[in-house]
Amino acid sequence: MSGHSKWAQIKRKKGVADVKKGQMFTRLGREIMLAAREGGGDPNANFTLRLAMDKARAQNMPKENVERAIKRGTGELSEGGQLEDVTYEGYGAGGAALLVQVLTDNRNRTASEVRHLFTRGGGNLAAANAVAWMFEKKGVLTIENAKNPDDLALELIDAGAEDYKADKTLLELYCAPENLKALRDALEKRKIAFASAEVAWIAKNPAQVSDEQAVATLKLMESLEEHDDVQKVYTNLEITDAVMAKFEAAK
């Protein structure tokens, strides 16, 4: 599977209990607010908002929190500062590329703190567009416990899937971002459950480093995702099963 898939697996294994619930709700609320600000507060007309709300429901975020975040995004509530959507780029140990998406009300503070985390984690922050060209934006839909994942992927080509990766019963479908809604609707029509649906930055080619460097990069990614302003971290790191095991054993 891709580094995106492996990192998602690691985070799912950690479970909700290993994440500060207040921090998670803050992150989800910001994502909802940004989606509402950019596309309006109606999830039926704003698919990005619908995706963000689905994530919030999956984590049992209270309904009133969701509604407040939408109102902040549409301007009905003015509480809180104005958030900026910023992407930082950098390298982990061994040169694996990292894209760090943040929502912040203080760009200078966040940039300084993200730089510190990179340095402490054995990586370094890079200039804009240093690594972004190594990634492409894709719609990504993940199905767990899929029966005959290869056959299912081929069936969904007509629904907009452009490519896929399968690992035992885990299936990851890729499509153009604008086709994600159609692909998701096709799964719902077939009554096929899926673990997640999102627009993400997917690496064009995997970066191979030593196991020790890979583990160090995963630790850096984990520390970045623990920062309150960080929404997502993407990498082109090739994460093998051996690396996953070493990372989990290092806890």
Image (tube, rainbow, N blue to C red):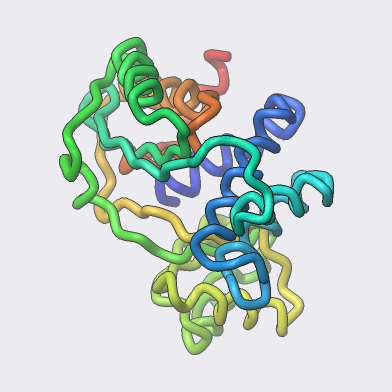
**In the image, what residue occupies the spot 47% across and 60% down?**
199
The residue furthest top is: 120
Task: Identify which residue, 129 or 194, lies in the foreground.
Answer: 129
Marks counted in the figure total 0
Residue 194: image location, x then y, percent: 67, 63
Residue 238: image location, x then y, percent: 34, 40
**In the image, what residue occupies the spot 45% across and 26% down?**
224
Residue 21 versus residue 85 in the image, above or below: above
Task: Identify which residue, 56 or 91, lies in the foreground.
Answer: 56
Residue 184: image location, x then y, percent: 61, 74
Task: Identify which residue, 129 or 73, lies in the foreground.
Answer: 73
Q: Is residue 60 in sight in this rendering?
A: no
Picture quadrant of residue 142? bottom right
Report the side of 47 relative to 67 (left or right). Answer: left
Picture quadrant of residue 45? bottom right
Q: In which quarter of the image is the C terminus?
A: top right
Residue 92: image location, x then y, percent: 29, 26
Q: Is residue 180 in sight in this rendering?
A: yes
Task: Identify which residue, 11 or 128, lies in the foreground.
Answer: 128
**In the image, what residue occupies the spot 46% across and 34% down?**
104
**In the image, what residue occupies the spot 49% across and 25% down?**
222
Report the side of 4 relative to 24 (left or right). Answer: left
